[in-house]
Amino acid sequence: MSLYKKAKNGKKGKVWWMNFWWDGKHVQESTRCTNKRDAEAIERARRTQLAKGEVGIEERELDPEPEPMMTFSEAVTKFLAWHQSTSRASTHKRYLTSSVALKAYFGSTPLDQIKNKDVEEFKAHRKGQLSSRLRRNETARRKLRPASVNRELALLKHLFNHYDELIPKNPVRKVKMLDEENVQDRVLTREEEKLYLMASSQPLRDIATLMLQTGMRPEEVCRIRRENVHLDQDYLFNPHGKTPAAKRRIPLNRTAKEVLARRLQQDGDYLFKGRIEGRSIVKVNAAHTAAVDRSGVRHFTLYALRHTYATRAAMAGVDAITLAALLGHSKITLVMRYVHPSEQNKMAAMQRIEAAS
């Protein structure tokens, strides 16, 4: 069958049209059906009529000149305007970021001229580029993260799906995503921890200290409320999280209790107050980057402090089940992403095994 739906101004049509050749003449007519099965039946009946000679092919006026295909930049602009009204703000913000490189690369290219090979070339181009987010203390510029390229490809695929009436064959459909290799193995040494905390401003210093002493996630620390801190019983309660395991009692050591006791002296429901009255601080990424730069320590993400806590706990002999509970994980296997034994610990383990044999 040769059925299609007409598109006008980027909007999907509802009625199916038949489009085929018969005895050297072009047949392009509306089936007047919005249901594809009904439209297929109409087309079969039309072909049967032509075969029996019951009807001829009526001469019809030529279709007006089709509007020129919009450029990629125009398509992205229209798509993002539509996407903003239908999606979450966080998703739209990510799409806006991903669209920058796509528009720079494809720009004025007509949308229907972008093929699979062009998408593969874009992927290779971006894979070899350097990240624009550099740290002053890095000795070499880092390549763009595979995850960033994959987010751009995901946006590109969504965009072509949106315009499937104009571009029936999505050129991104068979493009493979890059291996993101998201395993993080950065664990701070005691000396790095000291330098970093000394270079940290408040409230980052207290947030980082609590992460190192409890293994809490950054957002969990930022959202600590006064009523959930129980210093007299040596724990705080975290009521947030996607799973029941994330909502947990977190034991406190002396250092963590000192930080919390100092924070409790301030007014307000949240221990880390945000700029908006009655709300908590959202993130401290900028302060973290500045502290890393000032400290001279090799770059690491804020989340590496949680990895550091987990690795130190495992090296101290904390079993996997207990560590999973401390970190707020529902599965023991998830703990393995956070535990990174040092070379010294590996060697010491081998020596213990040898001594026991």
Image (cartoon, rainbow, N blue to C red):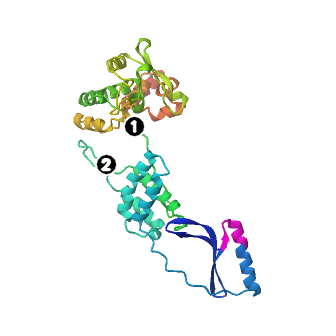
Q: Residue furthest top?
A: 232
**What amino acid is at disc 2?**
Arg
- Looking at this view, is 245 or 184 the one in front? 245
Give the quarter of the figure containing the N terminus. bottom right
Magenta range is: 31-41
**2 vs 1, front mark:** 2
Q: Tell me the crowding category of disc 2: few under 14, some 14 to 19, or many 20 or more residues within 10 angstroms, Cα based.
A: some
Q: Position of 265 compared to 20: left or right? A: left
Which residue corresponds to the image point at 39% horizontal and 56% vertical from the top-left? 99
Dividing the picture into quarters, in which one does residue 348 lie?
top left
Circle 2 is placed at which residue position? 142
Mark 2 lies on a secondary structure that is: loop
Res. 25 visible in picture: yes
Q: Position of 184 compared to 192: left or right? A: right
- Looking at this view, is 38 or 291 the one in front? 38
**134 over 62 or under it: above or below:** above
- Give the mark, 2 or 1, whose residue is nearer the N terminus: 2
Q: Position of 190 compared to 124: left or right? A: left
Image x and y of residue 156, in percent: 46, 58
Which residue corresponds to the image point at 41% horizontal and 32% vertical from the top-left? 219
Mark 1 lies on a secondary structure that is: loop
Q: CA distance from mark 2 to mark 1?
A: 17 Å
Dividing the picture into quarters, in which one does residue 105 lie?
bottom left
Image x and y of residue 161, in percent: 52, 60
**Does the magenta segment cover residue 32?**
yes
**Does the magenta segment cover residue 264?**
no
Circle 1 is placed at which residue position? 185
Image x and y of residue 347, in percent: 39, 29
Q: Tell me the crowding category of disc 1: few under 14, some 14 to 19, or many 20 or more residues within 10 angstroms, Cα based.
A: some
